[in-house]
Amino acid sequence: MALESDVILEGYNTPNETEKPIMAHPPVIYSDNTLQDWLTTVLRLSDKVIKLDFKNIKTVGPSLDILLKTSSELNIDRPVWLNADILKGPNVPIDIAVNASQFLTLIQEKFPNCTLSPGWTTLYLAHFPNKTYTQRMVEEMHSLVGNLPQQITFPVRAVMVKPAWTHLSWLLSQSKRYSLTLWQGKTDPVTVEDLLFIRNNSKPEQIYYDLYEPILSQFKKLAFSQPESSAKRRWRN
C-alpha cells in the first residue's frame, strides 16, 4: 500500500554537501535518483502512499520545499507520510534522534497536509538482553504530538511491541488520530504469535504492518483464518 524511501542531502556531512535531497540511506550519500525525480515518477506511475524517511534534520526543510512545489504543479492524490525518529528509544546508548521540535515545526510551516510518522531510535541485538518501549517514552511522545492536527502513526519495532503492549495501548488510547506501524528489522525474530496478539488486542484502523517475507504471508494466512478476519486490515510489503 505504500512506497517508502530514505532521503538525504547529496554529499551529506562532507565538503561536497549540497541542498539537493536525494534518495539514499547513509552511509550512501550520492545517487542519481533525486527526490524531485522520485516524486514525479511515483505520482505518474503509482497510486501508492508516499512515505519519506528522514535521517537528519538538515534534509527536512529542502525536502518539504520540493513537496510543496510538486503539490502546486501536480495533484498529490494520495497520503504523504513523513517519518523521522525524534526520540531516543530502547537499547540506544547515545541520542542520535532527529531534533523533534525542528522536525515538527518545519512540517507545520511547510507541508502540514500529511500523516506524521514520529518514532524512537532503537537497537535490537539477538542473544543479548533487550529492553523495550517504556511508559515514560510513550508519554514523552504524546506530549510532543498530542496537540497537532495531523493523523499520526508511530513506527514501532515489531519484535519489541508485545512486551510493551501495556504502554503502547495506552498511547493508542490517547487519540483517535493515533496508530502504530509495526516494522521489522531484517534479522529481527518477529513471531506470528506476537503479531496475532497485537491484532487481536487492537482495532483494524490502529495498526499498519511493515514486515518481511515469509513472516508477512504466514501472518496474513493465519489472521484471515480467524473469525474476525472479515474486518478490513492494512497490509504493507
Image: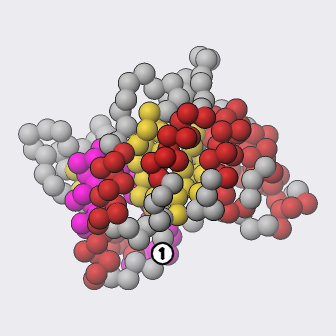
Q: Which residue is drawn at 62% across and 47% down?
A: 171
**Which quadrant of the rendered structure holds the C terminus?**
bottom right
Q: Give the image location of residue 196, x and y in percent.
A: 78, 47
Q: Within the magenta stretch, is there residue 65?
A: yes
Q: Residue at x 32, y 73 (%)?
A: 40
- Mark 1 sits on what residue? 78
Q: Residue furthest right?
A: 227
Q: Give the image location of residue 31, x and y in percent.
A: 25, 52
Q: Please name whichever residue, 187 or 99, is drawn nearer the observer in this view of the structure.
A: 99
Q: Give the image location of residue 204, x and y in percent.
A: 72, 61
Tag 1: amino acid: Arg
The answer to which quarter of the image holds residue 25 is top left
Q: Which residue is drawn at 58% across and 51% down?
A: 181
Is 174 drawn above or below residue 232 in the view shown? above
Q: Residue furthest left?
A: 15
Is 170 drawn above or below residue 23 in the view shown? above
Q: Residue furthest top?
A: 128
Image position of 97 (left or right of 209): left
Image position of 203 (left or right of 7): right
Element assignment for label 1: loop
Is 175 drawn above or below residue 91 in the view shown? below
Label 1 environment density (alpha carbons within 10 Å; few <14, some 14–19, many ≥20): some
For the magenta stretch, what is the residue range?
44-66
Q: Residue at x 42, y 43 (%)?
A: 85
